[in-house]
Image (cartoon, rainbow, N blue to C red):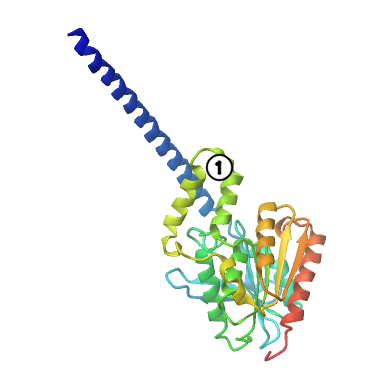
Amino acid sequence: MAVLSEPRSYKTRIAKAFSGLLALLLFAVISVSTISGFLLYQILRPARTPASFDLSVMMGHPATFSFPVAGAATRDGWIFPGLRGSPTVIVCHGYQSQRADVLTLVTALQDHQFNVFLFDFSGHGTSTGLTSLGYHETAELRAAVQALSTRDDVDPRHFGLWGVDMGGYAALKVAETDPRIAALVVDDVYGDPRDMLRIEVKKSGLASLPGVLPFTEFAFRLMNFSYWNEPSASARLGSTQGIPKLFVQADDRPALADETLRLFAKAPEPKQALRERLSYRDMSDDDRKSYESQIVNFFLQYIPPTSGH
């Protein structure tokens, strides 16, 4: 009987060990998925401190202009009038930013008679919801261009776009498909929202934990399932042939600078590159003025404000 009991005891120990391993594996999966889910939520719902302004006392005499976005809430933007019938430059803020953060660039453009438009992307500033790091934001920008083109005080056929990181991605994607985009500036741009997601996960310090990065990316893709097969911006760069493009990269954001350089290398002519020591949001007042002067000169060269362009 003792001889017969030994195999049973051995099998029991194996079963317990296997059960323990399964329990540990299940615990690890639950832990990683929980950490990944919490991290993803933090990335897609950045802290918002909406800036409030009284447009009636703002310089530049801006007016509210609302436009519909398919499947989303209406967006409220500000239009700063320039020379009647001249081109419009749409200024697209970046991730963890808002329209109020780019007002000095708006002023510089308006001072040279451009019409200028800006709004808050999803999950930023006054716009509620979650950001998608570029997917939904592209649709929002596309809707803005369409709505602005129906106004009788702007040139409906010539638009300029300026965008930084997330805003740059949206600007690049719209420029690839909309013939009304006549000049484009992208600053610290990336080719796919997943690129930005990976950068933010690594920045959190949690990417070193096994499984966190792939879990977070998979959950992000599920949340944006309708864009599962969306090609990266680099896939259609050839369609920007003939559109003047300025690619800006900042030394203090090396991961994005590398992405920007890669896109610049693949982009067709005409194109220019500009390298800055600091990213736009971290520039001193003097550096920012110099930067904005270069942006204004770029647009003046390619879409000069003339009535009925």
Return the residue nearer the eye: 4 or 138. Answer: 4
Q: Residue furthest left?
A: 1
Above/below status of 125 relative to 74: above
Name the secondary structure under disc 1.
helix
Residue 290 image-quadrant placement = bottom right
Residue 168 image-quadrant placement = bottom right
Question: Does residue 241 appear left or right of residue 73 in this picture?
Answer: right
Identified at 44% across, 68% down, the residue is: 72
Identified at 52% across, 49% down, the residue is: 42
How far across and down, in percent of the image, does residue 293 sit? 79, 70
How far across and down, in percent of the image, does residue 10 sit? 28, 17
Identified at 64% across, 62% down, the residue is: 189
How far across and down, in percent of the image, does residue 34 sit? 43, 41
Residue underneath mark 1: 207
Q: Amino acid at mark 1?
A: Ala
How far across and down, in percent of the image, does residue 141 sit? 55, 72
Q: Does residue 48 appear anywhere in the picture? A: no
Return the residue nearer the eye: 134 or 45. Answer: 134
Identified at 54% across, 56% down, the residue is: 194
Q: Residue furthest bottom?
A: 308
Task: Please count the marks in the image.
Answer: 1
* Crowding near the residue tagged with mark 1, few <14, some 14–19, many ≥20 C-alpha atoms within 10 Å: some
Return the residue nearer the eye: 121 or 4. Answer: 4
| Quarter of the image that includes the N terminus | top left
Above/below status of 278 relative to 208: below
Above/below status of 299 relative to 11: below
